[in-house]
């Protein structure tokens, strides 16, 4: 019987609890631009705090691209945010911390 590692673990210890992650929630986190943007912003913060500027620059550029591609949707979701200003601030990170 073939099965995943998770299935094997559950068979060995059925009391183990795991967060409920459905295929839908995984797909939504990949395809929902706001969720994707939020994840990149979290990663950006971590990279900046760790002084990992090359990785931070990459995350800033990706985040700015996500805004650029989804600005109309973002304005509907978060109408009080100035998305153009956020994008411009993100684009300053590579200018200040990374060689172009």
Image (tube, rainbow, N blue to C red):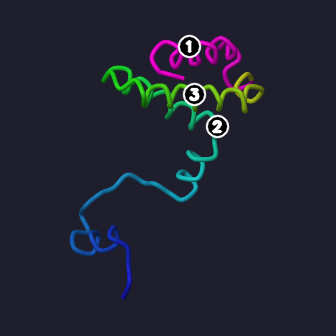
Residue stretch in magenta: 76-100
Q: Earlier in the sequence, mark 3 or mark 2?
A: 2
Q: Main secondary structure of the magenta part?
A: helix
**Farthest residue, direction bottom:** 1
Residue 95 percent across, percent down from the top left: 54, 15
**Residue at point 47% right, 21% down?**
98
Give the mark nearest the N terminus, 3 or 1: 3
Residue 78 occupies which quadrant of the picture?
top right
In the picture shown, does residue 37 fall above or below 28?
A: above
Based on the displayed image, in which of its 4 quarters is residue 7 positioned?
A: bottom left
Between the residue at mark 3 and the residue at mark 1, the CA separation in whole angstroms equals 9 Å
Mark 3, residues whose alpha carbon is within 10 Å: few (<14), some, or many (≥20)? some
Picture disc at residue 61: 3
x 58%, y 32%: residue: 62
Q: Secondary structure at mark 1?
A: helix
Q: Looking at the picture, how far across and down is residue 81, in whole percent? A: 65, 14
Residue situated in front as seen by the camera: 100 or 62: 100
Q: Residue beneath label 1, please?
A: 92
Q: Residues within 10 Å of mark 2 (few under 14, many from 20)?
A: some
What is the x, y in percent for residue 77?
A: 69, 26
Image quadrant occupied by the N terminus:
bottom left
Image-based side of 10 in relation to 88, left or right: left
Q: Secondary structure at mark 2?
A: helix
- Quadrant assignment for the C terminus: top right
Q: Nearer the viewer, residue 63 or 37?
A: 63
The label shown at residue 33 is: 2
> Up-down: is 79 above or below 8?
above
């Amino acid at each position: 019987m073939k099965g995943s590692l998770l299935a094997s673990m559950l068979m060995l210890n059925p009391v183990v609890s795991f967060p409920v992650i459905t295929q839908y929630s995984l797909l939504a986190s990949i395809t929902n631009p706001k969720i994707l943007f939020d994840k990149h912003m979290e990663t950006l913060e971590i990279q900046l705090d760790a002084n990992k500027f090359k990785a931070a620059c990459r995350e800033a550029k990706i985040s700015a691209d996500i805004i650029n591609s989804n600005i109309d949707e973002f304005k509907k979701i978060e109408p009080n945010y100035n998305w153009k200003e956020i994008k411009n601030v993100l684009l300053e990170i590579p200018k200040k911390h990374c060689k172009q």
